[in-house]
Image (cartoon, rainbow, N blue to C red):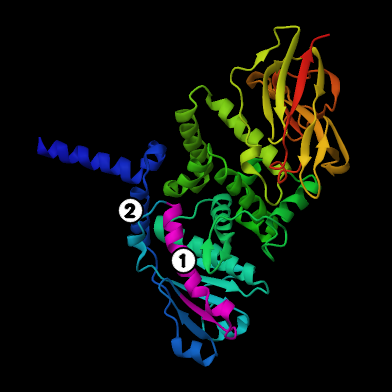
Amino acid sequence: MLKYQFLFFLIFFYFVIFRGNIFFAEEISAGIAEYSGREIRKHWNTEIPLDQSAIKQSGIRRLESKHLILYTDLAVSKQVDELPKLFDQLIPLLCNYFELNPQNYETFQVEGFLIDDFEKFKTCGAVRQVPNLRNGYALRCRMWIRNQDSNYYRRHLLLHEGVHVFMGYAFGHWGPPWYREGTAELLGTHCLENESLTLNYFPKSRYELPGWGRIDLVRGDLAKNRLRTIKDIFELESEDYDENTSYGWSWAFAVFCENHPCYRTAFRRIAWNLNGVPSDIAERFRALLLKTVQSEQPEWNTQEITNHLDHDWLDFITNLDYDYDFERTRINYNKNAQPISTPETQFLIQADKGWQSSGIRLERGKTYCVAASGRFQLAEKPKIWYSEPNGITLRYYRGTPIGTLLATLIPDQEEHFLAKEGTAGIGFSIPQKIGLGKTWTADISGELFFRINDFPSELSDNIGNITVKITMP
Ligand SMILES: [Zn+2]
């Protein structure tokens, strides 16, 4: 009998510890992820020892803190010499983000190389493991960083490579490029105030993080009609990261997930599920996401949740801007949206929010009259601006006066295949202009949404509502 119990235990152990991430994606805990990380670390080749006297002779300085030994040929300066102390702040913050016990990382130490003159490091054998060094490179417990003119961007690269090294050490894997670089960019984008480090920072203006420019890279692509869907991002290959725009897109997807309560947990838990086939990670993310959303909103089915993710992404990415207001732009879908059953239907649209469901479904081929009225505050500074639903022509956002009432249809699940990309009035990225009113024949059946046109960073100073009336002629 004992023999069978032992056999049962062995089979259980095999499936839960080694295959658990495949069969029970949602059951993986931080502890199991760390366990597999430790197993993988056992098979790491030991690092090639550094020739300390050659390093010294090359004029390279050695700065040491609890979690980092930094070798650099840069002259003594506060900005450079404080980097090891900054790195010491990174490790507990990463433990907190990945929900790991910081005690397990007390003795974790990285060897870093901050390089101005590459030849100097070559001479003393410190870059033997580096194939080429554009900005940064990480391998096991070592990382190499090209010096940057911007103090912000030098720190950014140090933290970015530090995230790679930490994840490799903790989990044994980094995951596919979109996740690996997305997480390193998400956590590397930081704020340093009174020497206190905050990771996962969303910049308020273009000038705040010199040298970073991720938002501008994505917007540059959008201006060239190079919008990337989530599927496109999942398919990015390592070579695609020769272009900085790929870092921008990976960051954007990570920051989108992080700032949405339905997607945050699934995105973070990918880290615990990295021990498997890397190409499988996108699927695992979807599985984790479906589980988290369905546990809180059981009314939505798998396809609907996937559709919402795609629509939310499209709304976010086409409006990506500094100081983006994630709270006010969050979209709530209405499972009970119904076709109009009375001659006239009326509802309010708030001026200080992004897309809002009307609770109404329009039906394909039917014609509707939409009329809007009301006066609302659109700006507070330098003076209070009032607007009506036809907007104010003093300022434009995405080619339309701010304050203009916009509408769009989100296709019913069975109509998704009919929804043509780029048709005005279908999807959040290409809305219809409604203004004071419009007669509208629906191209598809779907849930009707409204919002006023405004910058995604400037919703908080709006006050008031628009009254929308819908009749069927
Ligand atoms: Zn990287």
Quadrant of the rendered image holding ligand 1: bottom right
Question: Which span is picked out in magenta?
Answer: 69-98
- Considering the numbered disc 2 on the image, is that residue within a helix, a strand or a loop? helix
Label ID, residue 35: 2
Q: Residues within 10 Å of mark 1 (few under 14, many from 20)?
A: some
Label 1 CB sits under 8 Å from any ligand 1 atom? no
Q: Is residue 11 left or right of residue 57?
A: left
Q: Main secondary structure of the magenta part?
A: helix
Q: Identify which amino acid the numbered label 1 is placed on.
A: Gln
At 59% from the left and 56% from the top, the residue drawn is 201
Q: Is residue 96 magenta?
A: yes
Question: Upstream in the sequence, badge 1 or badge 2?
Answer: 2
At 80% from the left and 48% from the top, the residue drawn is 223
Q: Nearer the viewer, residue 100 or 282?
A: 100
Picture coordinates of residue 423 (x, y %)? 80, 29
How many numbered discs sit on the rendered protein? Answer: 2
Position of 336 relative to 192 (above/below): above
Residue identified by numbered label 1: 89
Quadrant where the N terminus lies?
top left
